[in-house]
Amino acid sequence: MIGSRIAAVGHYQPAKVLTNKDLAGMVDTSDEWITTRVGIRTRHIAGPDEPVDELAGHAAAKALATAGLAAADIDLVVVATSTAVDRSPNMAARVARRLGIPSPAAMDINVVCAGFTHALATADHAVRAGGATRVLVIGADKMSEVTDWTDRTTCVLVGDGAGAAVVEAADPAAGAPGIGPVLWGSVPEMGHAVRIEGTPARFAQEGQSVYRWATTKLPPIARAACEKAGLTPADLAAVVLHQANLRIIEPLAEKIGAVNAVVARDVVESGNTSAASIPLAFSKLVERGEISSGDPVLLFGFGGNLSYAGQVVRCP
């Protein structure tokens, strides 16, 4: 029986850092107002000459190098993003071209903030079904491009970046660390609570509705994702939630009951990077050595549509 595992991860953020003090000079806000309400202190902002596929390509190249693989070893590229400007060629094809990946299957997935965990599940399923052997899974978003920088309720939240994972076939019978079953779904009737729509496209959300939903409805779903992997929340070494804001991350992590886990708080320095937030935070935990190879980690995305998807993975 074929399983799958994460062989390596990587991340990338633009060089420009926008601080709360910078924002206070742009809109009616302050460092205290922002940190008290959302816990964010800085965020990285891409320039006009840094498209989403460039962010994604840097993160993917890092993951490939860490895995010791060449571009030609990849046969499927899946990119989670909601900030692609063009309809075609899609982001996955653009990344494949940047990296020189020959003739891969290439697809984009738009599930906004839950995009990466949906994309990871898609890659896992493709490998298990024999449709792919090695997959580049990328979450990348340029939220600065869909933000109204005069709206202090949204502009204080967002950042740009990308994170990537190399997924490959593994033998579960050999005890190889793998990717657990996904638990996913949505609340379509509440899809209006998080939006990127209009011309030009702009990000908007109903903050209180999202907060109540995330902190009350999602904890049992996240615990169920652990159960599908045959674990309890207490078994987890780390919890990497969508980095929406600190006021959602901390109570949600507490209600899940992962009492022994490192809780990713990358939102403090990166802001809400949508589909990039989970692989970005996960890659940083791995890079800093805060989790070890084989450790069980809950990845749990939630947000637009209102969609959610979570699975327990083993640290590469």
Image: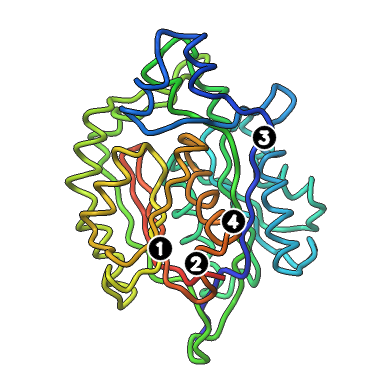
User: What numbered label is drawn on residue 291?
Assistant: 2
- Amino acid under label 2? Ile
Kindly report the distance in space between the C-alpha atoms of the residues bearing marks 3 and 1: 26 Å
Looking at the rendered image, the disc whose residue lies closer to the viewer, 3 or 4, is 3
Could you tell which of marks 3 and 4 lies nearer the N-terminus? 3
Circle 1 is placed at which residue position? 238
Kindly report the distance in space between the C-alpha atoms of the residues bearing marks 3 and 4: 20 Å
Circle 4 is placed at which residue position? 137
Tell me the SS state at disc 1: strand
Q: Residue furthest bottom?
A: 174
Kindly report the distance in space between the C-alpha atoms of the residues bearing marks 2 and 3: 25 Å
- Amino acid under label 3? Pro
Q: Residues within 10 Å of mark 4 (few under 14, many from 20)?
A: many
Could you tell which of marks 2 and 1 lies nearer the N-terminus? 1
Q: Are marks 2 and 1 in contact (CB under 8 Å)?
A: yes
At horizontal 53% and vertical 52% (from top left) the residue drawn is 279
